[in-house]
Image: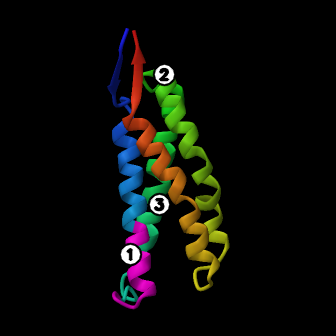
Amino acid sequence: MGHRRRRTDAAPLFAAAAVAYTANVALGSAVAARLIDTSSFRWLHHAIYIATCATSAAAFSAILWGRPRRASRRAALALAPAAAPLAAIPYLGTHSRRHPLVALAAAPFIVAGFVCSRLATDRK
């Protein structure tokens, strides 16, 4: 018959990963544009980066337990490639052109995981 759309039960984790990532990009961009001086609280960017990695890993874990199963796996697999740039960032240095480029390389996968987690289709 028809298809019913609903979000996966892991959708809040994908949303949390997207929010953490967006906050980190916003803060990093503001610092790069010299709109904000974080010299007295540099730890904030690092803390948000850790939150981004942790929430992304938690969202990816939906591949094992998320429902509906097929949609949760699709969302987790869409997010998975973000792990490579997120893992590379600490090793590339922060004061080069590579840092923002590598950080932004994760964006399409963060967005894809979020969107897929919201668009689960159940077949009856």
- Examine the image and state in which quarter residue 96 appears: bottom right
Label 3 sits on a secondary structure element that is helix
**Residue that carries the numbered disc 3 in the rendered image:** 50
**Mark 3 or mark 2, which is nearer the start of the sequence?**
3
Task: Judge by depth and name the residue closer to the eye, 11 or 58.
Answer: 11
Label 1 sits on a secondary structure element that is helix
**Mark 1 or mark 3, which is nearer the start of the sequence?**
1
**Residue that carries the numbered disc 1 in the rendered image:** 27
Using the numbered discs, state the Cα–Cα distance from disc 3 to disc 1 in whole angstroms: 14 Å
Q: Extreme front residue here?
A: 1
In the image, is residue 101 above or below residue 97? above
Amino acid type of disc 1? Leu
Amino acid type of disc 2? Arg
**Mark 2 or mark 1, which is nearer the start of the sequence?**
1
Label 2 sits on a secondary structure element that is helix
Residue 49 percent location from the top left of the image: 47, 64
Is 82 left, or right, of 19 in this rendering? right
Residue at (53, 30) in percent of width and height: 73
**Does the magenta segment cover residue 124?**
no
- Examine the image and state in which quarter residue 105 appears: bottom right
Task: Judge by depth and name the residue closer to the eye, 40 or 106.
Answer: 106
In the image, is residue 42 above or below residue 116? below
Say which of marks 3 and 1 sits in front.
1
Residue 56 percent location from the top left of the image: 48, 48
Instruction: Tell me the colour scheme of the image.
Output: rainbow
Residue 120 percent location from the top left of the image: 41, 28
Residue at (49, 52) in percent of width and height: 110
**Residue that carries the numbered disc 2 in the rendered image:** 69
